[in-house]
Amino acid sequence: MNDFAKTEKTMSAEKLKKTEKIPKAEKFTEYESNSANIVAERLELLQEYSTFLIPYNDRKNLSSAEKVCIGNYQDVHFWNNQKNDWSFPIPESWKKKTWCYAINSCCRDFSFYDSMTKEEKELIDFHFQNLDSAIQKSKADRDYWLYRGVNNIDWIKNPCAGTIYLDEAYGSFSLDFQKALSYTTSKEPILFRLNLKKKMEALYVDQAEAEILRSRRIWYKIKSITKETLEDRKHINTKIDVYTIEELRK
């Protein structure tokens, strides 16, 4: 039975709420070990016991500037400020998330950054500085499975088990594989699966997409490639290419 097909075999959420004697770490383990998506499904409950799963806007150790830059990059909420007067064209699919497009384009292509106006470069540098510092302040309090849905892997040369690649841009993952799959095509979905280890740098954004933001310029290794079956509203009996990856630590 694959990770997506496993059923929940542990106590109910209501029973867990009433349990006082189980150590916090065990509360997590009893749930997540039996379901691939259990953290996402019990996110609100697990937040009571986590120092990691705190929405960025509620964190006291993040500055106002860091919170603004995270919000701009995230682009989910109506209050996130998207810049619409860039000196370069924004692709139609990125009109509602221009900051994310501009920031990651600069990460991947130095000539893109060089083509910007002086004012735009200063804005991008400001976001680099604050996104980097916010992520550096954020470390996982335990192991988590993270998921990232993509439409293609053309940016990885020779994508096979054992391949090592550099992700030059910020990495947006999710605790919820259903959310991650929403960013893939319905015909040929591709899912990256990362085991985020305790004390690794990663920033939990908030519950909107259960998003986890990782630093730029991280080296990863493809550990395995498997085909797994999932059925939901978008993917009916669909085979998913699942790339299990690991970070190469320095």
Image (cartoon, helix red, strand yellow):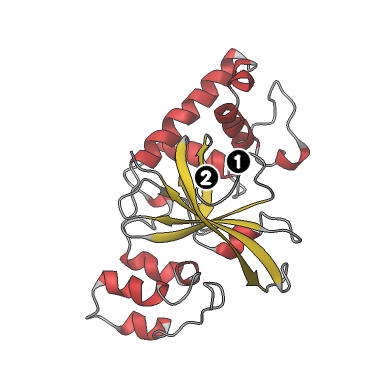
Q: Can you tell which mark lies on residue 156?
A: 1
Q: Which of marks 2 and 1 is in front?
A: 2
Which numbered marker is on residue 204? Answer: none
In this image, 249 relative to 79: left or right? left
> Residue 20: x, y in percent?
25, 80
Residue 163: assigned label: 2
Which of the pair 16/202 is nearer the observer?
202
Secondary structure under badge 2?
Answer: loop
Residue 148 visible in the shown view: yes
- SS state under label 1: loop
Q: Residues within 10 Å of mark 2 (few under 14, many from 20)?
A: some
At a point 66% along the width and 54% down the height, the residue shown is 183
Question: How far apart in space, not on screen, are marks 2 and 1 (Cα)?
Answer: 9 Å
Residue beneath the point at 49% across and 23% down: 125
Dot 1 amino acid type: Ile
Which amino acid is tagged 2?
Answer: Thr
Most foreground residue, 142 or 163? 163
* Residue 239: x %, y % from top left: 68, 67
Do we see residue 82 in this rendering? Answer: no
* In the foreground, 118 or 77: 118
* Mark 1 Cα-neighbour bin, 10 Å: few <14, some 14–19, many ≥20: few
Quadrant of residue 51 in the image?
Answer: bottom left
Q: Are marks 2 and 1 in contact (CB under 8 Å)?
A: yes
> Horizontal and vertical percent for residue 227?
62, 65
